[in-house]
Amino acid sequence: MIWHRDQLSSWTGFVELVERLNLNEQGDAGWYIRGQSNESWTLQPSLLRQLGEVTVERALGIEFGATRRFTSQYHLHLPADGVDKSQWGSIGWWMVMQHYSCPTRLLDWTLSPYVALYFAVEQSPESDGAVWFFPSSALETVTVNRYGKLRLGSEEQFESHVVAAVYPIEATQHSRRSASQQAVFTICTHLLADHGDVISEAFAGQEDRYPLNKVIIPAGLKDEFLSRLRTMNITPNSLFPSLDGLGRAARDYIRLRTWRTHNEGMAR
């Protein structure tokens, strides 16, 4: 994987990065951004991480079985809403499955740099985190020119044994959580491909214009960043509008009170 790599040394460095993105020619919706709490992690979707070393045929079979089981029982757990779900197709169902913690081939991103930063610092305080970003409109142009448009109703497009093409996609219908997180996704036609590898390959020879970027968040800055994000209302309560968010907020409260107590002790 080839990417442009940088490391932050202060909060100001991240704010300046956000300003550069806002002023870039890509425009408002040009960047897909992802935070990861461990910088050593690659850009693999949750399903790929869980599958491990398997053949494409076996992987597709497992994906099909999980999707069939979910879609056949989904209606048992929610009241009838009158929505015709027969037109959703695999991508629509995978978005729902992803929301309910089922591993899928989708990789989560966001349009908000600060939401991405939250996910980079919220866990693993002992490990460096990372914020990844790339210009989504440029990737879509390159991919469509090379492989054609994403065909939402074509199941065969997602069963490729050879072609690995990553497309940026947005939800057709948001949940409260995905709307709060400004969630977007990438999807790959090859189930076992690392999205970072494919995006890097798509931009090969154009790295000066359209790089895949990785910014390292040092472990020593995570608590400070988490505290600053809290003052911006980038918190579990805003990103996870449910009891789950309340529990996460209490977890962050404990962590930040401990951090401040330690800092106060060091200052004496």
Image: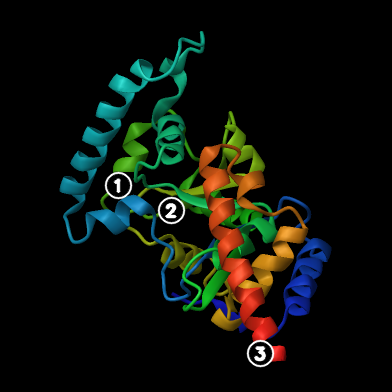
Q: Which of the marked residues, 2 or 3, is nearer the chain's N terminus?
A: 2
Q: Which of the marked residues, 3 or 1, is nearer the chain's N terminus?
A: 1
Camera-nearest residue between 109 and 208: 109
Q: Which of the marked residues, 2 or 1, is nearer the chain's N terminus?
A: 1
Q: Where residue 229 is drawn, which disc sits there?
A: none
Q: Is residue 149 above or below residue 142?
A: above
Image spot of residue 164 (x, y percent): 37, 55
- Which element is circle 1 on? loop
Q: Residues within 10 Å of mark 3 (few under 14, many from 20)?
A: few
> 73 left or right of 260?
left
> 64 left or right of 75?
left
Q: Evaluate if marks 2 and 1 touch, with contact meaning CB atoms under 8 Å apart.
A: yes
> 114 left or right of 69?
right
| Residue type pointed to by label 1 | Ser
Q: Quadrant of the N terminus?
A: bottom left
The residue at 41%/30% (across/down) is: 93
Which marked residue is nearer to the observer: mark 3 or mark 1? 3
Quadrant in the picture for residue 18: bottom right
Residue linked to disc 2: 165
Can residue 211 be seen by looking at this rendering? no
Image spot of residue 176 (x, y percent): 61, 33
| Residue type pointed to by label 3 | Met
Image spot of residue 79 (x, y percent): 45, 13
| Residue type pointed to by label 2 | Ala
Q: Is residue 92 above or below residue 6?
A: above
Camera-nearest residue between 17 and 23: 17
Residue linked to disc 3: 266
- Measure the alpha-carbon separation of dots 3 and 1: 57 Å
Camera-nearest residue between 189 and 229: 229
Residue linked to disc 1: 160
